[in-house]
């Protein structure tokens, strides 16, 4: 099976052992708590799921600048979009500094439970020129109403970087029990089915007739064993089709129009960035980390 991006094996940051997870949750109760932005919580889910392999946590300012400028981490590995935990300065708990541990609380679940524990390596204010750099290079517009830019600006001005250990997958397993899958779970299902060559199609929308035909053509062209239809399950801009409706529509299409046992429908817990070509590359990394060997590139990433 194809190797993950930049690594020989997946690097899921979910604390898998029940005892270790219980111990970390107990420790988290005594740590400073901070309710993070939805995008940061979704990134925690992606880190937990192995889709962000080989990252170990949230990026610092040097990494943010490198990714925004060159689409690479400082070490040279391709990475198209910053993965960050940004907060308003007045919401960072008093006394938190480099070397601290903090409990990150989920804004998308009632009661804001702890989703992860972060080891703080740096706390940095994002200069205006770096904010402008990210907006111009990642989103390719300066329109403050752009959904990705609006979400980025709303996060705040204080960058908190460092590795994380993740305690849960937020609301995704509960709301989408038949669809949410980690990268490791998808790889395991491929192995169980004996699928070695898999074409991946990513979408945030229901599939139409042209999408269906693209999947068929790609599967035939590379003689693939199967197709993975991999849908985004996180937050979307107003007017986009809700994930539950999209999921049902895609499953009906697969049941009616594709041969049995040739398609896997799965989803991942990420908030849409609407970052155009940069986000297309990021989603391609997700597919590679899920074990797919070929990708169908569409126009599903702009606003």
Image (tube, helix red, strand yellow):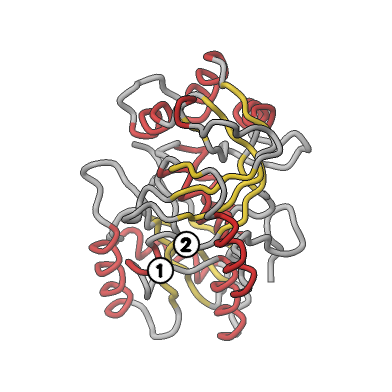
Residue 173 image label? 1
Circle 1 Cα neighbour tier, 10 Å, few/some/many (<14 / 14–19 / ≥20):
some
Would you say the residues marked 2 and 1 are in contact, meaning their CB atoms lie under 8 Å apart? yes
Figure quadrant of residue 66: top right
Q: Is residue 16 in view?
A: yes
Q: Please, is residue 259 above or below residue 214 in the view?
A: below
Q: Is residue 144 left or right of residue 261?
A: left
Figure quadrant of residue 27: bottom right
Q: Is residue 218 left or right of residue 233?
A: right
Q: Which residue is mark 2?
A: 169
Percent across and percent down for residue 172 are: 39, 63
Name the residue: 63% across, 76% down. 196
- Secondary structure of the residue carrying tag 1 is helix
The C terminus: image quadrant: top left
> 264 or 81: nearer the eye?
81
Residue 97 image label? none
Mark pair 2, 1: CA separation: 7 Å
Name the residue: 42% across, 56% down. 113
Percent across and percent down for residue 203 are: 38, 55
Q: Is residue 55 left or right of residue 239?
A: right
Going by the picture, which residue comes out furthest to the top? Answer: 129
Name the residue: 53% across, 67% down. 182
Percent across and percent down for residue 76 are: 76, 38
Q: Is residue 216 in view?
A: no
């Amino acid at each position: 099976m194809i190797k993950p991006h930049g690594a020989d094996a997946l690097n899921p940051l979910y604390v898998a052992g029940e005892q270790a997870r219980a111990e970390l949750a107990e420790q988290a109760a005594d740590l400073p708590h901070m309710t993070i932005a939805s995008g940061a919580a979704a990134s925690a889910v992606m880190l937990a799921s192995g889709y962000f392999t080989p990252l170990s946590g949230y990026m610092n300012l040097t990494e943010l600048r490198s990714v925004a400028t060159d689409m690479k981490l400082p070490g040279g590995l391709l990475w198209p979009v910053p993965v960050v935990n940004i907060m308003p300065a007045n919401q960072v708990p008093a006394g938190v500094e480099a070397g601290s541990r903090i409990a990150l609380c989920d804004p998308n679940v009632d009661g804001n439970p702890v989703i992860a524990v972060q080891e703080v390596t740096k706390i940095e204010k994002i200069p205006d020129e770096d904010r402008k750099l990210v907006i111009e290079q990642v989103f390719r517009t300066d329109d403050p109403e752009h959904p990705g830019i609006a979400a980025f600006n709303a996060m705040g001005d204080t960058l908190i970087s460092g590795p994380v250990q993740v305690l849960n997958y937020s609301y995704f397993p509960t709301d989408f029990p038949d669809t949410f899958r980690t990268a490791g779970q998808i790889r395991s299902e491929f192995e169980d089915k004996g699928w070695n060559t898999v074409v991946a199609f990513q979408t945030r929308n229901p599939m139409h007739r042209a999408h269906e035909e693209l999947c068929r053509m790609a599967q035939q062209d590379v003689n693939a064993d199967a197709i993975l239809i991999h849908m985004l399950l996180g937050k979307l801009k107003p007017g986009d089709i809700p994930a539950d409706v999209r999921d049902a529509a895609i499953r009906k299409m697969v049941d009616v129009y594709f041969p049995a046992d040739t398609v896997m429908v799965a989803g991942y817990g990420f908030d849409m960035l609407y970052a155009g070509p940069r986000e297309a590359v990021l989603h391609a990394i997700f597919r590679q980390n899920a074990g797919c060997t070929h990708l169908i590139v569409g126009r599903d990433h702009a606003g």
